[in-house]
Amino acid sequence: MKTVNDLESDIRSDEALEALFARAAPRPLPRADREIEIREQVRLAWQRSVRRRQYRRYTLLAIAASVALVTAVGMLWYQSPLLPPDVGPVAMVDKRFGDLHIADASGVRFVPSDGPFALLPGQAIETGDNSGLAMTWNNGGSLRLDEFTSISVTAANEIYLQRGRVYFDSDPITSNAAIVRGGGPDVLAIRTDHGLVTPLGTRYVTQQQRDSLVVLVRQGKVSVNGTGFSANALEGERLLVSTGDEPVVVPADAYGEEWAWIEKTTPAWNAEGRTIFEFLDWVSRESGRPIRFDSPMAEQLARTETLVGYGVVELEPSVALRIVLMTTDLDWAIKDGAVVVSERQPDVSAVSN
């Protein structure tokens, strides 16, 4: 690929502008209120280059500086969109991975920098293969997006789920609520093509398929109101709404394969100084599996022993369970769907050797 200096040797000055812009990648157009600022900065960059270069060379270099400046300012613009003073963020994205596409209502793409970032009214998010996202909503709840999911923020207390599935925890253990909480609504409604999904003190999944809507309730109560029907689902229930049929409610587990994707979107959790009991509570909330102790002594150890040197846990909770308890005096096993915690038994073979 030729550099600017290479181009100078074989392109006449009057062709430089066309050549450079032909090689520039397309960029989103800035809003009108930023255009004046961009043009002024480009003009100043041009004048600085003119003072430093001879006539033959300053044309190419100044244009290159101008293109770079427009690109930089344009990047700044679509990474930090301007908002009216009375409009604030509705959520703070805590974790993201894989292929994501975020755009505003007009379709202009928003490319966030590394780390947490605010989600704004009118924006839409689409996840691709092996992608996911977790955000703290303005009411403190945690909203998660699975792969191949598309949503748009239609109001401060509502999203539209076009396709895919989302999980909402109204009161998570891990939360950036202090960052976004500002007197926002207590309920996040999920609008779908089959009806409006409204939770009450709930942890649940909403899945929008081509011709049906599925709601899985891990805790609390969820209501779905559509055209000509109203239905409810309680803890341990699955609500199915199909086009042309009456809603159906059947029993469902609160853990298992169809819930496993949620752990991949679990935000990092600070384990430092927490008790083992608090850690187990976090694992239970994210995995859906209840915690049981096989003896009073095992529960006492969990409530009194603290975790030191672990820092922030970024693993999936079920993976962290195996690793963390290996370093304690407690052991665990899955029995009847629950995590059963017991005192660790001494290794007899090691003692005999």
Image: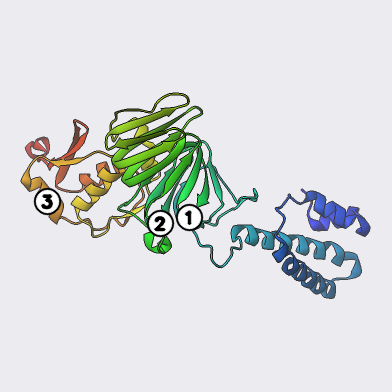
Res 156 label? 1
| Mark 2 vs mark 1, CA separation in Å | 8 Å
Q: Quadrant of residue 73?
A: bottom right
Q: Residue 146: x percent and y percent?
A: 45, 39
For the residue pair 182 and 82, the one nearer the viewer reads as 182
Which of disc 3 and disc 2 is earlier in sequence? 2
Res 234 visible:
yes
Q: Quadrant of residue 45?
A: bottom right
Q: Which residue is mark 3?
A: 301
Q: Residue at x 79, y 74 (%)?
A: 48
Q: Quadrant of the C terminus?
A: top left
Q: Is residue 56 above or below residue 168?
A: below
Q: Residue 249: x percent and y percent?
A: 32, 29
For the residue pair 96 and 192, the one nearer the viewer reads as 192
Type of residue at label 1?
Ala
* Apparent side of residue 204 relative to residue 34 in the rendered image (left or right): left
Res 185 label? 2
Res 253 label? none
Type of residue at label 3?
Leu
Q: Are marks 2 and 1 in contact (CB under 8 Å)?
A: yes
* Apparent side of residue 183 relative to residue 237 in the rendered image (left or right): right
Circle count: 3
| Mark 2 vs mark 3, CA separation in Å | 39 Å
Which of disc 3 and disc 1 is earlier in sequence? 1
Which residue extends farthest top? 245
Assign a secondary structure to mark 3: helix
Q: Residue 302: x percent and y percent?
A: 15, 50
